Image (cartoon, rainbow, N blue to C red):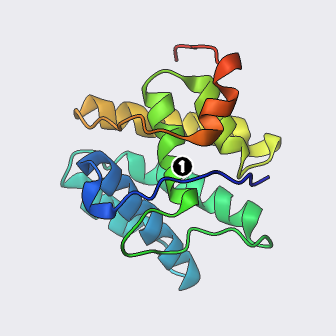
Amino acid sequence: MSQSNTLTLIKLQNLEISENLLLWGMRHCLNSYKLDILPLKKLLLIYSKFKIDDISYSLNEIMRLIVDNNSTQSMGFKCNCTFLTEEEFNLLCAISNIQSRNDYNGKKLLEMYLPNSNLLFAFKECINIANSLERENYFLPLRHNDFIDHIQKNSKRILH
């Protein structure tokens, strides 16, 4: 499922607040799963301070799906304290494309990590995240992504 992507290294210090909020949640979920702890309580607590606590459920579901469907592969959201990992970058790009109403590109990025049987569910959860962020004026920037550039020719703009 995973496809290689030439990634421009993005330093964590150069991220928007919206990206930092999602990145923290992604990493918190993964660390919690490793320790066999449920991440939802802390996600709700932290995200409620930004009035986006409703993304907690969706992010938890997406991260659980990604972990469950990729646990036997060599991919992973390995924590890098300085730069985004490729997987983190791709998931942020998927949600930013969905938030920008470019659903086709968002789905294509999700396909890298999820089977078709989980894709629609994950896509709906990404829409929930994108809409919740947008409601509170947190916008994810569209960043250059080689994989997206490759599929751009066939891109269709679908409003949700």
Is 95 left, or right, of 50 in this rendering?
right
In this rendered view, identify the residue nearer to me: 92 or 53. 92
Against 16, residue 96 (above or below) is above
Residue 35 in the image, given as x and y percentages of width and height: 53, 86
**What crowding class fits label 1: few (fewer than 14 Cα within 10 Å), some (14-19), or many (20 or more)?**
many
Write the residue at 63% across / 14% down: 156
Write the residue at 74% across / 73% down: 74
Q: Residue furthest left?
A: 49
Location of residue 4 (image quadrant): bottom right
Q: Residue furthest bottom?
A: 35
Residue 92 in the image, given as x and y percentages of width and height: 47, 47
Location of residue 49 (image quadrant): bottom left
Against 120, residue 7 (above or below) is below
Which secondary structure, mark 1? Answer: helix
Write the residue at 23% across / 35% down: 136
Residue 30 in the image, given as x and y percentages of width and height: 52, 72
What type is the residue that disc 1 sits on?
Answer: Leu
Location of residue 132 (image quadrant): top left
Q: Which residue is mark 1?
A: 91
Write the residue at 27% across / 55% down: 14
Against 3, residue 25 (above or below) is below
Residue 114 in the image, given as x and y percentages of width and height: 73, 49
Q: How many marks?
A: 1
